Amino acid sequence: MASATAAALPGELRYIQYEHALEDKYLPAIRALISKDLSEPYSIYVYRYFLYQWAHLCFMALSPEDDSLIGVIICKLEHHASHSPPTYRGYIAMLAVASAYRGHGIATALVKKAIDTMVEKKADEIVLETEETNKPAMRLYERLGFLRSKKLHRYYLNGNSAYRLVLLLKPQMQAQLPETIPEGQAQAV
């Protein structure tokens, strides 16, 4: 039987920005939630790398009943010199929602919060990688305007390939995007 909390809709959830003062309470839950869903085994240092430097780009969805963690997005924003001129690139490193709460728009709300904050901070683009087999994630990001820019063969430790997705936030960036690739077609890396 599903708990009353599992029936909570996204509007009833509390969405908060991560703060360093919350580490003791939420970092173990963040690690547990992400390790269930993502194929990469991240060390505590990877989490701290993101959360210490870009706490303002990390958001959590909390249960209205007990403030337990239901979803989290972890991002960063920094100058990226591989483009000419250099870009201010946002990066979505990790996104996870507890399986009992999927399908209620929680991941969409978390991604939108991250995008809105990066736009406020003047990001030129936002990128991420997701496993090519993760169809729900691909649909989510593409629905939000992300485009497939590159296929990364055997990108993950489990041997799975990934797509790099990009959301171009400034009109001048769109001219720099290579032709996007349809699902199932490879592009040399």
Image: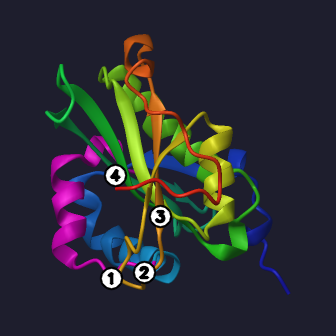
Q: Identify which amino acid the numbered label 3 is placed on.
A: Ala
**Which segment did they paint magenta?**
39-58
The x, y position of residue 8, in whole percent, is: 75, 60
Q: Earlier in the sequence, mark 2 or mark 3?
A: 2
Membership of 177 in magenta stretch: no
Q: Identify which amino acid the numbered label 4 is placed on.
A: Tyr
Is residue 62 at all visible to an observer of this figure?
yes
Name the residue beneath numbered marker 3: 162
Of tags 2 and 3, the one toward the viewer is 3
Disc 2 to disc 1, how far (Cα)? 7 Å
* Residue 18 disc label: 4
Residue 175: quarter of image: top left
Name the residue beneath numbered marker 2: 35
> Secondary structure under badge 2?
helix
Would you call the spot at circle 2 few (<14 residues within 10 Å), some (14-19), or many (20 or more)? some
Residue located at (13% from left, 33% from top): 81
Answer whether labels 2 and 3 touch (C-beta < 8 Å). no
Q: Earlier in the sequence, mark 4 or mark 3?
A: 4
The x, y position of residue 146, in whole percent, is: 55, 38
Of tags 4 and 1, the one toward the viewer is 1
Residue located at (44% from left, 74% from top): 34
Q: Quadrant of the N terminus?
A: bottom right
* Residue 41 disc label: 1
Disc 3 to disc 1, how far (Cα)? 16 Å
Of tags 3 and 1, the one toward the viewer is 3
Disc 4 to disc 3, how far (Cα)? 28 Å
